């Protein structure tokens, strides 16, 4: 099997209970974003279908979705070419997220009840207790739950939709960074500081801490991207 096709195959998780076309799209997406299909590579639809042992329909679907996300360039009668994602893209995404996450956190803070704050505190305590005791993916899920809790309580569905779309580009790098013991310990400290600023209803501290928190995350992601020559 061709090395590039093999890279996609490695990310094709057929155990997931999802339509094949979505699984193929996610496999392509992850492989392109992580740089395992280099920018400038041309994708031969027929070749991928044959070597992945699927019909051309899910391949076409995946390429169409990738073009919508600007991860590939496609035109009628021309083969699809990978564009990928770069360090410049990462900086732009995080600049936007700093503004949106700060707003979401301030809005959530103003609407959360005493019971809500207690629930968020218990999540942080569980994360702290189990930080080195549970599988890496469980730790990633705990950090995701913290962010999701804030998004669920900010009552801003359009903002959340934008954030989720932005997150999707870098989530694979985020997961890699959280696998680092150093990063996960620091991220937990930052989440505690965000929580305390919310309890204190301190909007200035919320803005400062979230910018610092996302800045730290960005540096880990940039480091991983540059190691993969994505700059």
Image (spheres, rainbow, N blue to C red):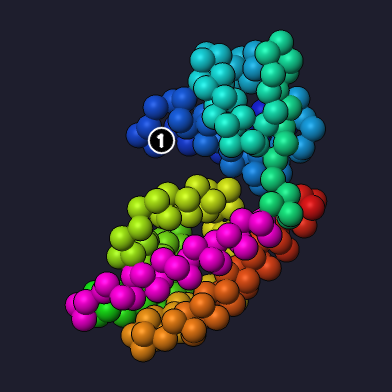
Q: Residue at x 45, y 59 (%)?
A: 137
Q: Is residue 2 visible?
A: no
Which residue is tagged 1? 15
Q: Residue at x 79, y 32 (%)?
A: 40
SS of the residue under disc 1 = loop
How crowded pointer 1 is (Cα within 10 Å; few <14, some 14-19, many 20+) is rated as few
Q: Residue at x 55, y 14 (%)?
A: 56
Q: Position of residue 163 (x, y in %)?
A: 48, 54
Q: Is residue 101 left or right of residue 52?
A: left
Q: Magenta segment, which residues?
A: 90-115
Q: Position of residue 194 (x, y in %)?
A: 44, 80
Q: Is residue 142 left or right of residue 82?
A: left
Q: Residue at x 68, y 13 (%)?
A: 76
Query: Up-down: is 116 above or below 17?
Result: below
Q: Position of residue 75 (x, y in %)?
A: 69, 18
Residue 38 belongs to the span the image colors magenta: no
**Helix, strand or loop for the magenta stretch, by majority:** helix
Q: Is residue 140 left or right of residue 17?
A: right
């Amino acid at each position: 099997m061709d090395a590039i096709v093999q890279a996609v195959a490695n990310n094709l998780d057929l155990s997931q209970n999802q339509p094949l076309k979505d699984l193929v799209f996610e496999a392509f997406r992850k492989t392109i974003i992580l740089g395992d299909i280099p920018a400038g590579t041309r994708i031969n639809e027929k070749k991928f279908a044959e070597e992945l042992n699927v019909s051309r329909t899910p391949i076409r679907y995946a390429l169409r979705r990738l073009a919508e996300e600007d991860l590939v360039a496609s035109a009628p009668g021309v083969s699809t070419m990978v564009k990928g994602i770069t360090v410049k893209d990462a900086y732009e995404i995080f600049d936007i997220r700093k503004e949106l996450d700060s707003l979401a956190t301030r809005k959530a803070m103003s609407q959360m009840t005493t019971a809500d704050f207690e629930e968020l505190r218990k999540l942080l305590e569980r994360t702290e207790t189990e930080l080195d005791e549970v599988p890496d993916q469980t730790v990633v899920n705990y950090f995701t739950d913290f962010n999701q809790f804030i998004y669920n309580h900010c009552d801003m569905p359009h903002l959340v939709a934008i954030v989720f779309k932005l997150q999707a580009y870098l989530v694979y790098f985020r997961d890699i960074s959280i696998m680092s013991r150093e990063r996960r310990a620091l991220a937990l400290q930052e989440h505690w500081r965000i929580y305390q600023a919310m309890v204190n209803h301190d909007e200035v501290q919320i803005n400062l801490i979230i910018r610092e928190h996302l800045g730290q995350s960005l540096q880990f992601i940039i480091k991983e991207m540059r190691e993969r020559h994505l700059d």
